[in-house]
Amino acid sequence: MSTLADFRAETRDWLEENCPEEVRRPGFVPWGSRQIELDEPTRFWLDRMADRGWTVPTWPREYGGAEITRDEYAVLIDELKRINARPPLTGRGVNYIGPTLLEYGSDEQKARWLPGISRGDGGWAMGYSEPGAGSDLASLSLRAVKDGDNYLLNGRKIWTSDAMEADYIFVLARTSPDKPKHEGISLILVDMSQPGVTVRPIRLISGASPFNETLFEDAVAPVDDVVGGVDHGWTVGKRLLQFERSTHAGINTSGSQGGGSEDARMPEKLSAYVDADSRGRILDHGLRDRLIRFEQAGHAQRLTQQRVIEETQARAPGFASSAVKLSGALHHQDGHELLLEAMGTQGVGWEGETFESREINTTREWLRQKALTIAGGTKEVQLNIIAKRVLGLPD
């Protein structure tokens, strides 16, 4: 019988032979979009890992996985981090809808969708929020009306991340408007490459447009692409949110994860803007204290992530994911505040010759990080879940 030590040795040898040097550093991680052309090393890395089942290592082999154990998964992640290899695949396919299909999908749906997801064949968007239904998601109004073997969808979603480059979208739609609002909802898979789907980018304060408004005008979805049964979408949709929040928290073991921590790079980032003594210690006592506290919080966050992964018996953590997701978001935001404090006026540049490109990128990334306590469930929503589901406090 193979031991973990054997698995580690075999994994290390395979990675050394198959992982290109070009992907052993931070950079773009594919999320499956057919509209994004991959460079040769990234495509090679994705294809090799998919062939081995390591894009979704815990999934069944028949759906593109490798069926490795939880302990083996931890070894695989350790070995990826050891060589600083970035994940071969990420996104809503392997981390959100894929695990949800494994739990709630029919055999036909699993066979149809999961192998393609495991190979990065098609990127996914998430159609939950609407202009009038955000935190109160059950008030959504996107209608899905049965028309023979299809549903016709009419309405709109908002804040649909990456929809401009997505090939598919999973949506929560109202299939029975006469039922109580939580009971008349279905989760439906929709092909975005059809005339009935229109995407409108939303420009953000950071200058980027990753979020979009998505309009559905008689968009067609086969009845076979309703996941978990008609009018059962609230149950299925909530489970998918647990996968989403677990991914944000870094504790989702459904898809492939890897890469180093940004915390380790913080001293290097600060070094260009602060004075230090001969031993490399930051001379500004207040800033040095903040950096120490930031690194301590980062270490505690990683230990908590590992503890939650080890404690959970499901494919993804439950309500504890809200606590880890929120603490992680606040930690990331604190890191960007720390960096901007050290940069001084060089940290508030938008354009101009007096600012380096990395300084401008830092400013815009600082602005983008403000969304971390909104995306994937707002800070307020997470605190309510923690209070009721984790701490057991009364309503």
Image: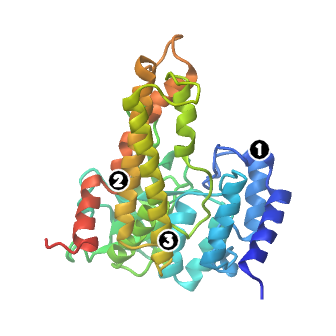
Foreground tag (1 vs 2): 1
**Circle 3 SS class:** helix
Mark 2 neighbour density, 10 Å: few (under 14) some (14–19) many (20 or more): many
Q: Residue 77: in sight, yes or no? A: yes
- Find residue 194 and report its horizontal and vertical position in percent: 53, 55
Question: What amino acid type is highlighted by mark number 2?
Answer: Arg
Q: Earlier in the sequence, mark 2 or mark 3?
A: 2
Q: Earlier in the sequence, mark 1 or mark 3?
A: 1
Q: Which residue is mark 2?
A: 156
- Find residue 3 and report its horizontal and vertical position in percent: 74, 82
Q: Earlier in the sequence, mark 1 or mark 2?
A: 1
Q: Quadrant of the N terminus?
A: bottom right
Mark 3 neighbour density, 10 Å: few (under 14) some (14–19) many (20 or more): many
Foreground tag (1 vs 3): 3
**Circle 1 SS class:** helix
Q: Could you tell me which residue is drawn at 73 percent across and 47 percent down?
A: 23
Q: Which residue is mark 1?
A: 22
Q: Could you tell me which residue is drawn at 69 percent across and 44 percent down?
A: 25
Q: CB under 8 Å between callouts 1 and 3?
A: no
Q: Which residue is mark 3?
A: 309
Q: Could you tell me which residue is drawn at 55 percent across and 27 percent down?
A: 271
Q: CB under 8 Å between callouts 2 and 3?
A: no
Mark 1 neighbour density, 10 Å: few (under 14) some (14–19) many (20 or more): some
Say how the picture is coloured: rainbow
Foreground tag (2 vs 3): 3
Nearest the eye: 177 or 158: 158
Above or below residue 132? Residue 276 is above
> CA–CA distance between discs 1 and 3?
30 Å
> CA–CA distance between discs 1 and 2?
40 Å
User: On the picture, is 374 further left or further right than 167?
Assistant: left
Q: Residue 138: in sight, yes or no? A: no
Q: Which mark is residue 377?
A: none
